Image: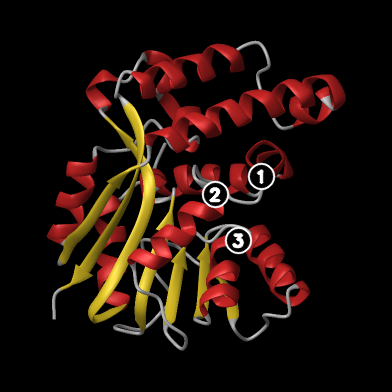
Amino acid sequence: MNHEEIKSCCADAYSRDIVAMLLGDSYHPGGTALTRRLADRLALAPGMRVLDVASGRGTTALLLADAYGVQADGVDYAPVNTALARGAAEAAGLVGRAVFTTGDAEHLPYPDAGFDRVVSECALCTFPDKERAAAEFARVLKPGGRLGITDVTADSDRLPPGLRGLRARIACVADARSLDEYTRILAAAGLRSAVTERHDQAMLRMIDQIQARLGLLRMTAPDRLADAGVDLAAAPAVLDAARAAVTDGVLGYALLTAVKSP
């Protein structure tokens, strides 16, 4: 499967309602609490222009626009997510302060040096060409601007077979990298790491949340799970494998900030 097909599969998966039912409003471990921590680490201030890459249905961008007074732009590969995010901005009274566009993280539809900050949550792990995406982060940042990501980390050599393949890639696991590797990729793009934090417990809490919601949906909406392609027979084993991988230090979650060289 080529890069464009992988991106299309990920975009299709994350535009489905079943994902929101399993993950909640924030499609990443730590939820809005971790997003606020990331925002504080980036020293966001009113009037800054911030880009959220892989913005999904707009949760992060809307939070930053509302709580921090920034001008938030969100870009997502899935047109469905862009439409939903625009609707959410209208409902929240944030039209003009949170603007959403359909686009590719590896070819961002923005001019050079247009943003004070760039954020991306639980997304770099899914991009087929991470080096290209990092270069795009750097390109659209102003000199001295800051990048903030929260993302799945993985020791890829130790991932069990059940956490490999396309489904695991869409689930942010199969192509995740170690924190050191993310740091290296960003540094090669001119983004010097400033802060790194481990938040592995947030990953465990999300696994528990998915397992609980999956059990509820199995009883109340089995047809919706089947229509979304959820393998109810295989899901418990996959979640157990993911939980064990976090416990063993193979999988985790991290916060990272970096600064663009002046």
Residue 211 visible in the snapshot = yes
Residue at coordinates 42% horizontally, 82% vertically from top-left? 45
Mark number for residue 59?
Answer: 3
Name the quadrant containing residue 246.
top left
Q: Position of residue 222 (x, y in %)?
A: 82, 23
Quadrant location of the C terminus? bottom left
**At 37% from the left edge and 40% from the top edge, which residue is drawn?**
199
For residue 31, which numbered disc appears in the image? 2
Q: Which residue is mark 1?
A: 24
Residue 100 can be seen in this image: no
10 Å neighbourhood of mark 3: few (<14), some, or many (≥20)? many
Distance from disc 3 to disc 1, alpha carbons, whole Å, reads 10 Å
Q: Could you tell which of marks 3 and 1 lies nearer the N-terminus?
A: 1
* Depicted 207 relative to depicted 44: above or below: above
Bin the neighbour count of mark 2 within 10 Å (Cα to Cα): few under 14, some 14-19, many 20 and up.
some
Q: Which residue is located at x 53 percent, y 32 percent?
A: 205
Rendering coords of residue 32 (x, y %): 55, 55
Q: Amino acid at mark 1?
A: Gly
User: Compared with residue 231, is residue 63 higher up or lower down, i.e. above or below?
Assistant: below
